[in-house]
């Protein structure tokens, strides 16, 4: 019964994530220009075609989320390819972001989501192993945001500072200190998440952090773009951030139902 419940949570999480990425690719765009130079017209043609290809790939994955079951194990491997596709997309965002490797960490939860769903739905991998991978992916995501919050090597993102300054009417220096505080909060969440008696507190904190992240994402779009563009852009972005909450809820449900003495 517990496995079935986890499957349903991850199924819905995977569906929303893939709908978000399909929406992005089919109606907005993605940084596939970094796969090859754009000096020639053929390059732009290639970028447009490969963007549409991955858009339909993610759309098909969203459809498969609710049309395949455990009896379709061969087709289920499609979700592994979707995780690799999301890894490629994260690498392209890294290239777009001056090849800053912590950018990859920001997408760890998204990359892991289809793979986690594949494990619980189409394989006999134990739930404890899947939950360990799930918790590890959440940890990597938090560490990625904490890295940028502290500004190690790459500095604090200017758009983060501008967004906080705009929202709270703060000076730049005060906004930077607020971001430092957020980084400390993220590190504390990582530590708490791996202490068994405190895991539920950590998960509640991560959900709160995820809500702040979603709000901040929408805010940045409304600052940078006109109203109608911001609405479209933020809609699919919010769907792509759903794994931060969905994976936490999966893990919370798991530890809430399992024997209290189990070590994981």
Image (tube, rainbow, N blue to C red):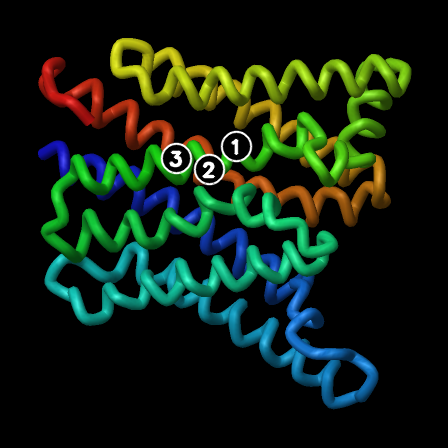
Q: Image quadrant for the N terminus?
A: top left
Look at the image and tell me whether residue 236 can be seen.
Answer: no
Is there a contact, CB below 8 Å, between mark 2 and mark 3?
no
Q: Position of residue 242 (x, y in %)?
A: 48, 38
Is residue 209 toward the left or the right of residue 83 in the image? Answer: right
Is there a contact, CB below 8 Å, between mark 1 and mark 2?
yes
Look at the image and tell me whether residue 182 can be seen.
Answer: yes
Q: Which residue is mark 1?
A: 143
The span from disc 1 to disc 2 (Cα, nearest Å) is: 5 Å
Between 208 and 130, the one nearer to me in the picture: 130
Is residue 229 toward the left or the right of residue 48 in the image? Answer: right
Label 1 neighbour load within 10 Å: few <14, some 14-19, many 20+ = many
Position of 81 relative to 136 (above/below): below
**Of the two numbered discs 2 and 3 in the rendering, the one whose residue sits closer to the viewer:** 2
Q: Image quadrant for the C terminus?
A: top left
Label 2 neighbour load within 10 Å: few <14, some 14-19, many 20+ = some
Q: Position of residue 75 (x, y in %)?
A: 23, 70
Q: Position of residue 68 (x, y in %)?
A: 23, 61
Identify the mark at residue 246; answer none if there is no mark.
3
The span from disc 1 to disc 3 (Cα, nearest Å) is: 18 Å
Q: Which residue is mark 2?
A: 140
């Amino acid at each position: 019964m517990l496995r079935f419940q986890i499957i349903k949570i991850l199924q819905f999480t995977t569906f929303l994530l893939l709908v978000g990425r399909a929406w992005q690719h089919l109606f907005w765009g993605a940084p596939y220009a970094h796969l090859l130079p754009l000096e020639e017209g053929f390059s732009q043609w290639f970028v447009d075609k490969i963007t549409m290809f991955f858009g339909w790939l993610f759309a098909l994955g969203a459809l498969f989320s609710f049309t395949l079951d455990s009896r379709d194990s061969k087709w289920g491997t499609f979700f592994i390819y979707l995780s690799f596709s999301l890894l490629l997309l994260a690498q392209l965002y890294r290239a777009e972001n001056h090849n800053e490797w912590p950018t990859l960490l920001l997408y760890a939860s998204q990359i892991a989501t289809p793979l986690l769903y594949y494990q619980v739905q189409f394989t006999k991998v134990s739930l404890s192993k899947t939950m360990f991978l799930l918790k590890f992916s959440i940890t990597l995501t938090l560490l990625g945001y904490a890295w940028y919050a502290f500004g190690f090597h790459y500095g604090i993102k200017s758009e983060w500072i501008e967004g906080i300054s705009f929202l709270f009417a703060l000076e730049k220096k005060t906004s930077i200190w607020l971001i430092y505080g957020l980084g400390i909060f993220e590190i504390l969440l990582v530590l708490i998440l791996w202490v068994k008696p405190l895991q539920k507190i950590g998960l509640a904190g991560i959900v709160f952090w995820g809500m702040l992240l979603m709000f901040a994402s929408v805010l940045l779009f409304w600052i940078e773009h006109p109203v109608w563009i911001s609405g479209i852009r933020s809609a699919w972005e919010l769907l792509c951030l759903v794994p931060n909450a969905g994976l936490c809820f999966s893990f919370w449900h798991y530890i809430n139902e399992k024997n209290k003495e189990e070590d994981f």
